[in-house]
Structures are given as C-alpha cells and as structure tokens.
Image (spheres, rainbow, N blue to C red):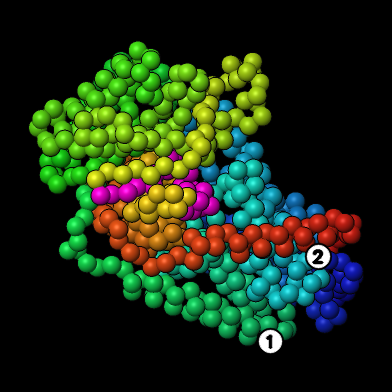
Amino acid sequence: MKQNHPSTDSPISIGTEDTVPAASILGWDWKRKIAGPFGLTCVSNLLLWLAFPPVGLFWLAWVAPAPMLLLVISPSWQYRRPLWKVWWTSLMFWLATFYFIPFPHPILIVGWFALSAYLAIYTPLTLVVARTLIWRWKIPAMVAVPVAWTGLEWIRMNFLTGFGMVGLSHSQYANPMMIQIADLSGAYTVTFAMTAFATACALAIPVDRNTRKRWVGGLGSVLVLGLVAGYGAVRLSQQDKTNNRDNVTVALIQTSIDTILAQKTESQVLDELKHLREINWAARRADDSIDLIVWPESSYPYGNYISDDRRNESALISQANLKEMWAELTHGSGRFTAVPGIIGTSTIDVDNKQVFNSAVLVDDQGKPVGRYDKHHRVMFGEYIPVIEYFPAVMKVLPFARNVLTPGEKAELMVSGNLKIAANVCFESTVPHLIRHQLNSIATQKYEPDVLLNITNDGWFFGTSCLDLHYACNVFRAVELRKPVLVCANTGLSAHIDPWGVPKQKTQRRKAEYVICKICPDAVYPQSQYRKIGDCVPILMANICVLTLMTLIVTQRRIRHW
C-alpha cells in the first residue's frame, strides 16, 4: 500500500520513513472516519463529557484525551480540514456541558452558542501546539502535550476576564487523593498530570511498530499515577483529627427558591420571608451554640439594601427594615439568643447611582458593620461587554437592570474570633482572584480563618451547574489550604476542609442548613500555590503563544496530519 509522508519542513506533521498511518496498523483502512480527526475527537469528547457532572465518572478523564492525542503523537493524517472536524466535535462537548446556560432566559441561547464556539477553539489549538512541540522542536510527547494543554487552559481561564469552569482537573473534585497536588501550582498541576498520563496511554496504544514507545507509555503512566497518588496520600495523612479546640459555630442557611427574571410581588416577598424564617428557626432549634448565621447571595427578601447614608431618608428606612427582619428571622424576636450574620444582597449607592452585589456583615441586632462588594462580574448576567457603553441599546435588553458596578478591594469580615474572607457567586471559579484577595487581606490586616462563598445558583434549577461550581470551591480549598464554606440558594452548600474533603454537604433544591465548626487561628499545611501563584502555567502559556506566533510568522500551512 502506498503511503504518503509529510515533508520535513512542516511544523505540524513530521514523520520518518519507517512510520505508517495509525489506521493501517489498527486495520482501520476501511474506517477512515473512525480513525481520523473527527472520530478520535468524538471518542475523547464523549469520554470527557461522561467524566464531568451530571454523569461524573471522574476516572474516565484520565484516559479521555488519549484518542485525540493519537493525532499528535502518530504519523501524518491525510484528511482534509482536520482542524475544523476537531472544532466541531469540541463544540458539541461544550454545548452538552453547558446546556443549562439558557435556563434563566431564552435570549441566553445566543450566549450559549457563542461561549461554546469560543471554548471549542482551544482543542484544535492544543493539538497544533503539541504537535509542533513534538515534531518540530523535538520535545518528548509526555512533556509537550501537558505543556500545550495546561498553557492553553490557563489562557482560557484568564483571557477576556477568564472562564474558570470545567478545567480538565475539575473532573476530579470528588477524588481527594488525586487533587492534593493542586497546592503546588493550582488546579493546573492536576491538569498537567492528567494529560501526561493520557499521553502515556496514547503512546502505549499499538499504532505503529515502535515497541520502545509502548514501553515508555506504560512506564510513564505508572510513574505519573504513583507520584500523584503518593503525594496525595502524604497530604491526606496530615488531616486534622482533633475536636477539642474552641470552635466557632457557623450556620449556613440553604434556601430553595428558583430564580426568575421578574419583579417580585408582595406575596412572593412574604413567601420568601416565611421560607427564611422556617430554615433559620430550624437551625436555631437544632444547635443553641450558633455564633454566626450566613444567608446566600441575593437572599435579602426586599431585593436591594440602600447603603448607609444618614443624609438619605430611604437609607434610614432600609436599615430599620433590615434590623426588624433580622430580629424576626434569626432569633425570633427573643425566642433565641441574638447572633450576627452575613447577608447576600444588592447594595445601592444612591449618591453615585451605583448597584453592587454584596455580602453584608450585620451584628446581633441587624446593624451593618462590614461589607464586601463583588469584583468579578458575570458576563451577560451582571454586565454586558461593549453594549453597556450604549445606553439606548441597554434599555431594550432584559438584563439592563442587572448591570452592576464591580467592587474595588477585598474586605476582611470579623465576627467574634472568626476572620472571614468572603466572595460572591462565580468569583470562586477564578483561582487567581481568590488567591489575590486572600493574600491582600493577610498582608493588610489579619490572616483569614476561612473562605466563604455565598451564591445564588437558583438560576439553574438544580442542574449540573451546581456541581461544576461546587468543584471550583473544592479546588480553592486545596490550592490555598483553607477551609471553605459554601452557602448557596438551591445548593450545593458545604463545609469543605483544606484537603478538599466535604465535612458536610447539602442536597440540591432542598431547603436545609449546615452547622459548621471552624477553628480560629488554626494552622494548616503550607501552600506553594499561595506563594508563587500562576507562575508555572503562565510560563507554559507563553510557550504556547510563542509556538503559535512562530507558525504564523513562518507562514507554514497545515497540509497533513
């Protein structure tokens, strides 16, 4: 059978005279579509989808990239427009993964397709960069592929404010043993290890007659798993088992109210007040030692809280409503001991005509004593890029009233002996933001005892978005070696220890509470990621950019795979 080989000047597909197409070795000549870019990436993306929620077969993610990596490590592929085929299969993966995006409003169908189309670009880019590193720059595959995948994942999570959900590593959130290495260089460390393992598996697949390559793949896979699992075992052995410390008791109140884009009626406000009262009172009856009560994002039933401005009469009325409501809902106007709390609400600055998405700390009488304003806004939900500079257009858009002003700095909330670093909503999906806030607070004030994420995931009606968001909070705990509290409307609320293990976790779309015991000033293992941040993945990202720029400058066309 005649074989075509790529020219030696091609940076994308460089082979040798004794190599043969993978389809021939596997006996797949008559199944070229299955053994080609479309078929292989279909298999990989299907396995990846099964590894993430809602299915959650997390172990599949370790081998899922292997089929598509045959396009990188094998000899030339002789099919037309392979990158478009890779992009189309990736588009299907992202559409299936983020099926819940249009749930809040039908207009978000446009955003769903646009986001999925953008994210799908990274898969063919990863294959192009990895193949160039291997065949042109002669870098070993078990190094080149992880560098390309991890570097481009970092770009995806940072470019245009970033999109931090569904990194490859996030599939492992329920597998504590294998995510402990996240304290080295963040979740990207886990992504690097997983793609190194998948590359080793691809090398071990008998697509050519190179026995040495198969031995390298087999030994490499064992080595990667051994190192990751060994580090995880050491870290997990350091878990704090003591229970005799002076703990602060925190109650996380999980409301179960599906969120819709409509103005609340008076009866809906009354129903929400009753709903909050029932959960709060149940928590107070269950544990009389509660020191702090936390409500989710946007849980203030009246919608907006007007910031403290004594010159404004409406601010005084707002504060009076807040005190009265807090007294009734948290300690039953004398039924229980008064305690402070944290409330999620929109905060209005009347003078500057600004609206913030805030976490407000109130004392045991319901008086505001601290506030954190959300920094990282949700695109199309809390701001609309570019279009927000055209007021006339904004008036006709359904999300116009939801455009928020970003906060400016991190704030430490102190309640009794407990020091809290709060974040709101999807901010916890952005690792560099949470790291920066934690270090900023620790430098200027005191070391926080716990990270707190308050969120309203009622927009997504109990879908797998809740699991994907929860996965990010698990990684923030491991990366920074801090306990994390998650208080979510409709779930998933949880108390996650610094090893990413949930001490308590709620069910989705169920009204309930979580009683957490947090030790102030506890000492946990040090986190290298907290010190060096994203330095390592940034280096990999620069390598990817340099590689792509080299291809563009040299004006070499991709002719063969």
Residue 408 rendering spot, x and y as whole percentages: 51, 37
Residue 68 location in percent, x, y? 66, 63
Question: Residue 239: which quarter of the image?
Answer: bottom left
Q: Nearer the viewer, mark 2 or mark 1?
A: 2
Residue 433 in magenta stretch: yes
Residue range corresponding to the magenta coloring: 417-439
Indicate which disc residue 455 carries.
none
In magenta segment, residue 530 = no
Report whether residue 375 is seen: yes
The residue at the point 66 percent across, 73 percent down is: 143
- Tell me the number on the disc at residue 12: 2
**Relative to 541, 504 lies left or right:** left
Is residue 463 positioned above or below 142 on the image? above
Q: Quadrant of the N terminus?
A: bottom right
Is most of the magenta stretch helix, strand or loop? helix
Q: Secondary structure at mark 1?
A: helix
Please identify the quarter of the rendering in which residue 371 is found: top left
Please provide percent x and percent y for residue 210.
72, 84
Above or below, 448 against 21 in this view is above
Type of amino acid at the residue the image marks with label 1: Arg
Tag 1 residue: 212
- Seen at 81% across and 68% down, the residue is 13
Residue most toward the top? Answer: 313
Question: In the picture provided, is 186 more to the left or to the right than 411?
Answer: right
Q: Residues within 10 Å of mark 2 (few under 14, many from 20)?
A: many
Residue lying farthest front? 444
Q: Nearer the viewer, residue 449 or 125?
A: 449
